[in-house]
Amino acid sequence: MSPGLTTRVPMLSNPHRVPLQSVDPSRPCGGRMKGFGLLHLIEHANQVYGPESLVGWAEALPAPLKQYSKTAGLTSVGWLPLELYFSAIEYLIKTHHGGDLRKAIEFGHAMATRDIGAFFRAAMKFATAPTVFSLSGRFWRTYFDFGSLVMTTKNPPTADAELRDWPLMAEVAYYELAGSFVAWLEASKASNVRLSRLELTSASVLSLRLEWS
C-alpha cells in the first residue's frame, strides 16, 4: 500500500447535499462493471483478511447473486451489477476497519494496482500524468457499461477532470474511485501524485483536481 495514501485524497465534498446511501445489492442502480474487479477483490480479501472474511457478505446477497460470491462463479469479462463489488468493499470496511469509508481509497488503489499489467506499467512509466489519465478515460467503457471519465482542463502540474453519469450514489464508491485514480497516475512518470478536489457537483458528476510533480 502506498505510504500516506489517504492523506493524498481529500474528504468528499458534497455542497449540494446529494443524497448518499449504503450499497444495497437488492436495489440495483442499473450500472454494471466487468467481473475482474470483484474477482480480484475476493482474492485480495482472502489473502489479507482470511478465507472466511466475506462469508457474511455472501450470505446476505439476494439469491440470484450468490453465485458470484466465489471466484469459481466469476469470469473476468462478464458484466456484473456494480453493487456486488462495492457492497463487498463496504462489508470489509465495516467488519475490519470500524466502518471508516475512507478506507475505500486503499481498496481502490490496491485493486487498480493489481489490474495494471506489467506491459502497460512499462509503457506508462514514460508518459505524463495527463496522458495516463486520458488513456484511462478512453478505456472507461472496458470497465463499466455507462458514464465517461473526461479531462476538462490541463495546466501541468495540475489538471481538472469529471466522472460523468455515475449511477451509484454511495460514499464508498467515490473513495474507491479516488484511490484507483491515484494508482493510475502513479503508473506515469509523475511523482507526488494527489487529488486536491473530490467533489459531487451534481447527482451524476464527480469533479476532480489532479496534482503532481
Image (spheres, rainbow, N blue to C red):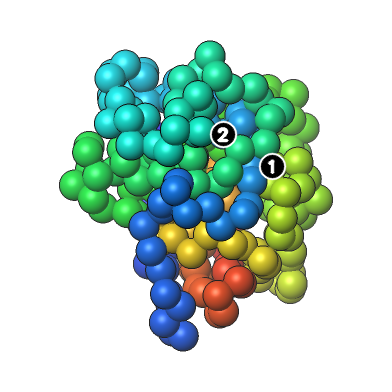
Residue at 19% over, 47% down: 98
Q: Looking at the picture, which amino acid does disc 1 mark?
A: Tyr
Q: Is residue 130 visible?
A: no
Q: Earlier in the sequence, mark 2 or mark 1?
A: 2
For residue 28, the mark is none
x, y (%) of residue 1?
A: 40, 35
**For the residue carrying disc 2, how many other residues have a C-alpha within 10 Å: few (<14), some (14-19), or many (20+)?**
many
The image shows residue 144, relative to residue 44, as above or below, that is below
x, y (%) of residue 182?
A: 54, 49
Residue at 80% over, 50% down: 138
The residue lying toward the viewer, choosing from 6 and 166, is 166
| Mark 1 secondary-structure assignment | loop
Q: Which residue is mark 2?
A: 37
Q: Is 175 left or right of 54, judged from the image as shown?
A: right
**For the residue carrying disc 1, how many other residues have a C-alpha within 10 Å: few (<14), some (14-19), or many (20+)?**
some
> What is the C-alpha distance between the residues marked 2 and 1?
9 Å
x, y (%) of residue 180?
A: 54, 46
For residue 143, the mark is 1
The image shows residue 51, relative to residue 100, as above or below, that is above
Residue at 61% over, 29% down: 36
- Residue found at the very far right of the displayed protein: 138
| Mark 2 secondary-structure assignment | helix
